[in-house]
Amino acid sequence: MSSLLLALPSKGRLHEQMNKFFDSAGLKLSRSGGKRTYSGFIEGIERIEILYLSASEISNELLKGNIHMGITGIDLIEEGRTPASKKVVLLSKLGFGKANVVIAVPNSWIDVESIKDLSEVASEFRSYNNRRMRVATKFTNITRNFFSKNGISNYRLVDSAGATEGSPSAGTSEIIVDITETGQTIEANNLKILKDGTMLRSESCIFSTVDEIWDHIDLKPVEKFLRIVSARSEAMDKAELSFDYTKESSELEISLYRKFKAIFVKGTPDLGDSVSLIAPLSELTSCSLYLTKMGYGPVRTSQPNFIYNRDSISWNILRESIKRA
């Protein structure tokens, strides 16, 4: 059996965030031969060989079918896809490296607030200026695909050699498409993001190539790794609420799901049961207050470190994808 090749970010903020995630999942990474080497392994899990690459290199190697799995951003995978690319599937979102690819226009364009407005302005711009509107971006494929879907055709892409946000003020473009975490740098350059101008929501994920590269790979270590990662990822934005079911309510289960996406861990409870709910962390307070208002309590809350489901979604995706390859 051959070893699986897993590519991980080699440096920078993504590398630090990845290490923090793996530490929280109890997965210890070790480098082969010292800190400066670009290969390694996961202690306690055999036949997984780690390669340390940049995030862009990881997406390229996945799309070429040269590695089995890798951690990189959704934006890099989507930007790198071509008709010749190998099929790459998303196995698990990891909850870090979040950023959005957005469209931003000058604040002075007071009548442009939406994609529809931009489409109209693009046509008018060409009529008045005898040239197409320039869009500065490093995301040419994402931009073309998004603009095509939204009926925008009167534009020309220009490469943003430096900071994309500065292109309109430098006179090299009229608008920009860029990736941002907070939008603050865009605002600082007197630009505004269109209200429906989020083209792609990105974050760091584990991706897999679907190819003959999986022939002769021992899948047992891969399943173990993915189950651990999925369980940690699943728990990161979830909360557990515990209370005694002292009052029967035929509507409680469906109401909790509809209002808060909260689910009973053991299914519909019986009167007198001590029950647990899993809910989005963002709904923790609202859900707790709702339960106490309904006459339940005390409501005890905690955040789980792992949520192991009977079926691991990431493992199932990989297994089914390999079968179809």
Image (spheres, rainbow, N blue to C red):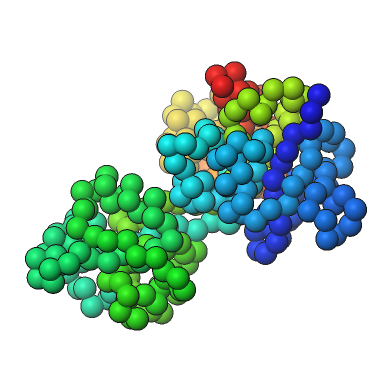
User: Residue pushed farthest right?
Assistant: 33
Q: Residue at x 89, y 57 (%)?
A: 34
Q: Is residue 276 left or right of residue 283?
A: right
Position in image of residue 86 (x %, y %): 53, 34
Position in image of residue 191 (x %, y %): 33, 74
- Above or below, comparing residue 173 to residue 6 in the picture: below
Q: Residue at x 78, y 53 (%)?
A: 38
Name the one closer to the observer, 114 or 31.
31
Q: Quadrant of the C terminus?
A: top right
Residue 242 seen in the figure? no
User: Residue pushed farthest top?
Assistant: 323
Q: Residue at x 60, y 28 (%)?
A: 211
Q: Is residue 39 left or right of residue 175?
A: right
Q: How many marks?
A: 0
Name the one closer to the observer, 235 or 41.
41
- Above or below, comparing residue 271 to residue 281 in the picture: above
Residue 49 seen in the figure? yes
Q: Residue at x 20, y 64 (%)?
A: 132
Name the one closer to the observer, 150 or 238.
150
Position in image of residue 320 (x %, y %): 58, 21
